[in-house]
Amino acid sequence: MVNLNGTLIAKEKAAIAIANRGLNYGDAVFETLRFSGRKIYFWEDHYFRLMASMRILRMEIPMNFTMEFLEREILRTIDSLEKEEVSFRVKLLVWRKTGGKYTPITNDIEYVISFEKLDTPFYVLYEKAYEVELFKDHYIISGLLSTLKTNNRLINILGSIFAKENDYQNCLLLNENKKVVEALNGNIFLVSGNNIKTPPLTDGCLNGILRKQLISIFKKMQDFTIEEASISPFELQKADEIFITNTIQGIVSITKYRKKEFTNEVAKQLLPKLNLKVRMD
């Protein structure tokens, strides 16, 4: 089942207009949520990021689009099919209503909520080979729009095809200044000794929910210093450890970039702290 504007419909029967603005112009934003133990992980952060994104894109936020309303709709969608305690990946997609070309005739919105099962009820760190490479065919343009989760993901798609064709597990993306910005599916953190570094939002990286949570955790760990600063590709091979973060997977350790192999000691320290933060949130 999916929830299309408040109506529960079988996924195979759900339909949108051919003139849908999300389909035609990428005029849409979304949140990808992890749901486990009858709880949406870091829901408040996701909600306020969605509201901020809608405002930036000049979408009209309905009066009933409160945090409580959307949480109820997500729960109602999941409960329509699933009665057992299972973990899910939930996608909340919002688009501007049909009408107009580049200039919309209305800023009112529509939405859909969908979900799929996840394998684990909490974050785990997989001990497996995870090799990455730079994707240099296209660049992220630094600025506010690149920090939003919109339907404009062509770089991520092309980078994913490149990774698949060349047997990489992921790729790292660059901005127009040739600075490392993020991975195809999440933010990145570099560990060099006791110093932790992650790209700043001004470089064009996604304003990630897990990024925010881990920065908060690092600031409370006396053994480490955390800084938001631009990362040069030359720094990658000098790092002791690199990991990728996103709401669904949590922390993914990179094991190899070109000839450099990495440890995952800091990621191991972070994982229980992250799972604890989920429970306390």
Image (cartoon, helix red, strand yellow):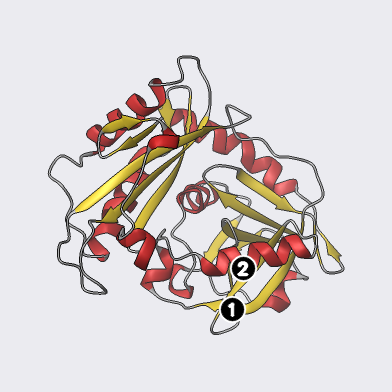
Amino acid under disc 2 = Leu
Between 42 and 75, which is closer to the camera in this rendering?
75
Q: Is residue 84 left or right of residue 18?
A: right
| Residue type (three-letter) at the residue carrying disc 1 | His
> Residue at the spot x=64%, y=79% of the render?
137
The picture places residue 30, in percent across and down from the top left corner, at 38, 51
Residue 11 vs 214, above or below: the answer is above
Q: Residue furthest left?
A: 63
Q: Position of residue 78 (x, y in %)?
A: 41, 26
* Location of residue 158 in the rendering, given as x and y in whole percent from the top left corner: 61, 68
Please tell me which residue is depicted at 82% across the width and 50% down the height of the picture.
129
Instruction: Classify 227 as above or below 215.
Output: below
Quadrant (top left/top right/bottom left/bottom right) for the C terminus: top left
Pointer 1: what residue? 138
Give the distance between the C-alpha atoms of the residues marked 2 and 1, in whole angstroms.
9 Å
Circle 2 sits in a helix, a strand or a loop, which is it? helix
